[in-house]
Amino acid sequence: MVALLSRLGNILKGSDGNVNIMGALSIRVIRKDGTIEDKGVVSRGKVTTVFVNKLVDGLQAAAYINTWKYHDSGIGTGAESSGDTTLGTPCGDARDTGTQIEGGSAWIYKSVATHTYTATKAITEHGVFDAATVGTLMDRHVFSAINVNSGDKIEFTYELTCNAEA
């Protein structure tokens, strides 16, 4: 177990040797007919600079640290960047409020939300925000298109790993 944690710590370190935080997105598609397609982890990547700044502020004043639970998806295809502030092209539906729980360990934040689509779309991106509308983007993930029809659902599971240096 110690060896595994040490390897994970080395994976999360950047080329500068600093410990980084990383987001991961898993997807399950729930078709209107009840069929479930488990896509697994579809993307891993950096969180936004704006989120990191707000995280540090929140640690000082915790007033809004628990608001990062609003999931949105879209059809944008531009590469994600730590400088992103919104999705490329949001799908236009209301954001879903995710459940907030501890992930597989004490250093993983997990939020799960299921969205029911009202039209046919090719979903290619997902983001977590701190508000039901507008708000600040925590993390954006871009992935291969998942085609949905009206009535289909996608369950988004977002995990943020914050690993302390070993």
Image (cartoon, helix red, strand yellow):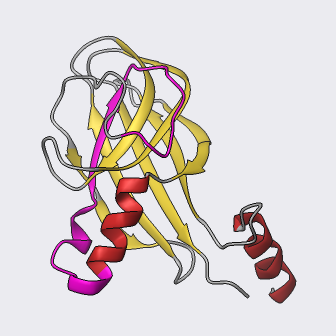
Please tell me which residue is depicted at 77% across the width and 64% down the height of the picture.
Answer: 11
Please tell me which residue is depicted at 83% across the width and 73% down the height of the picture.
Answer: 7
Q: Please state if 154 lies on the left or on the right of 115 as rendered.
A: right
Q: Position of residue 104 (x, y in %)?
A: 56, 74
Q: Position of residue 151 (x, y in %)?
A: 27, 22
**Image quarter of residue 165:** bottom right
Q: Please state if 7 lies on the left or on the right of 125 as rendered.
A: right
Q: Quadrant of the N terminus?
A: bottom right
Q: Position of residue 108 (x, y in %)?
A: 51, 73
Q: Quadrant of the C terminus?
A: bottom right
Q: Position of residue 101 (x, y in %)?
A: 37, 72
Does residue 22 sit above or below 102 in this rendering?
Answer: above
* Residue range highlighted in magenta: 59-84
Q: Is residue 67 magenta?
A: yes
Q: Residue furthest toward the top?
A: 120
Q: Is residue 95 magenta?
A: no
Does residue 28 sit above or below 102 in this rendering?
Answer: above
